[in-house]
Image (spheres, helix red, strand yellow):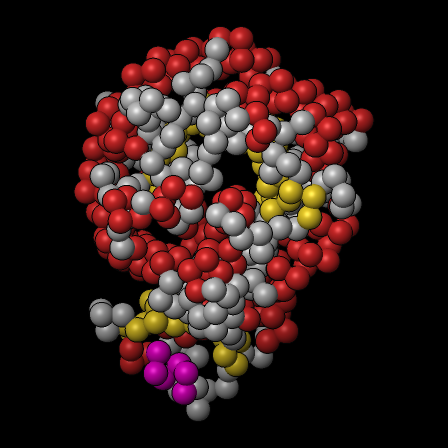
Amino acid sequence: MSRYTLLPFQFRRTEQHDVLMVNECGDFLFLPDHAFERFIRHELPEEDEHFRRLKSHLFCAGDDLDVALQKTAARYRTRKSFLRDFTTLHMLVTTLRCNQRCAYCQVSCAGKDASLYDMDRETAFRAVEMMLQSPTKHPKLEFQGGEPLLHWEVVTAAVAYAEQLAERMKKKVSFVLCTNLTAATREQLEFCREHDVAVSTSLDGDACLHDACRKDRQGRGTYRVFMEKLALARNILGRDRVGALMTTTAFSLNRLKDVVDEYVRLGMDGIFLRSLNPYGFAAEDAATLGYSMEHFVEKYLEALRYIMELNRKVFFPEHFATLLFSRILTPFATGFVDLQSPSGAGISGVVYDFDGSVFPSDEARMLARMGDRHFCLGNVKTDDYREIFGTRLKRLTSGACLETTFPCAFCVYQAYCGTDPVRNYLETGSEQRNMAHAPFCIKHKGILTGLFDMLRHADDTAKDIIWSWITGNADLVKRPC
């Protein structure tokens, strides 16, 4: 029997008669069945090639156990480095009013004249002050709605106040405006240019797909006016300061290639193929808009393979796959809330609702709009930073760690995945209940299985494409002129 110590890892037997092994640092190996059996029985000779790979990737240690543990700890700290800056993203809901009524609206937005749902300046300023108490030196203030353009005076006031306070505190605030763009004016977009405010908008595909769900208050499609305003925004801000997101519904699930083609046609810098969230109008009309998560995973992977082939000719990343590939192939943390443990809710992002209520995530705010305020952390008008981000958030976070949650703690993908206590609560009635059959788990497990299959069979060009996405360096792939 060989003398070596096994270090913590999870594993999954594959259909290719080998075993996928992933350790606490996120390093992975495929090991033949016979070698795996010998390894766990301490019968694998130390001169064996498989043993050398296992040891170099910190799946085991010999006499150098102390050194191996120090290396593991250092890499684990790197993977959890998102905790150091604490809450970086602060989302300010300036109004619930909206000039559109999208079929899947997650917050059930109010009509454009319902001023009762507007945030006042005092509340906005209190939220900005709370944001700047976070330890991060580079907070991000994201304006959401509703449609924030309909309450523009509070947006401009919050930007000016944040800039003023940040300069005094030697911090640098970045700004993002989440808008459907259809109400945008030249003056508003010029303000965004002057204050370096990036724009994040929504595009569901071509005219047919976009107009199927994204309609104005009179029930008319918005694609035509959106295209006009997109061109205006790009002209004023530059293409690199205007991004778009899509939401997959039953109308577009079988046409994801068409959605990708529309994004490529418009010169977008990539696409994030997002599944439907079960909140607001989307929950009310699930029978029309929804689909099984198994079906989404199937169509997502089909579209991803299409995007990979496109990338042999043009640089065009799929952003969710990029996040996952980065977690698989590098030791570094990613800022995506859904892929963090402890949960990124409240730690990586927080939402200030129009009335000053504070929620750990946008999903928690959506849940409150559905009548359940279980996750409300407090209010900027009555509670201080320590109360909101101390006791109440600590209680939420303590039960939102994959490493201590069954069966997630034993899942081979634990190092790459995250936990969403809000989504879990909505789907199971508990923040910590077994999620093995929940849509959140089905999605991540299915996609990660697909990505590992891609990595296993990737040729040199496919590997270069993946690394070009991770690094943002399009030149890593040799493409025809």
Residue 227: image x %, image y %? 33, 17
Please state which of residues 216 and 240 is positioned toward the viewer in this rendering.
Answer: 216
* Residue 39 magenta: yes
In the figure, is residue 72 to the left or right of 447? right
Please give the name of the residue rendered at 66% of the width and 51% of the height, measured from the top-left corner.
377
Q: Of all residues shown, which one is farthest toward the bottom?
A: 1
The magenta segment? 36-41
Residue 124: image x %, image y %? 68, 30
In the figure, is residue 92 to the left or right of 265? right
Please state which of residues 2 and 221 is positioned toward the viewer in this rendering.
Answer: 221
Please give the name of the residue rendered at 36% of the width and 39% of the height, measured from the top-left corner.
104
Residue 45 visible, this orientation: no
Please state which of residues 159 and 268 is positioned toward the viewer in this rendering.
Answer: 159
Q: Quadrant of the N terminus?
A: bottom left
In the figure, is residue 174 to the left or right of 420? right
Residue 287 visible, this orientation: yes
Total numbered labels placed on residues in the image: 0
Which of the 4 image quadrants contains residue 341? bottom right
Residue 193: image x %, image y %? 55, 14
Residue 343: image x %, image y %? 55, 56
Give the overall secondary structure of the magenta segment.
helix
Please give the name of the residue rendered at 37% of the width and 48% of the height, measured from the top-left corner.
283
Q: Of all residues shown, which one is farthest toward the top?
A: 186
Please give the name of the residue rendered at 33% of the width and 22% of the height, measured from the top-left corner.
218
Please state which of residues 227 and 35 is positioned toward the viewer in this rendering.
Answer: 227
Q: Quadrant of the C terminus?
A: top left
* Residue 208 magenta: no
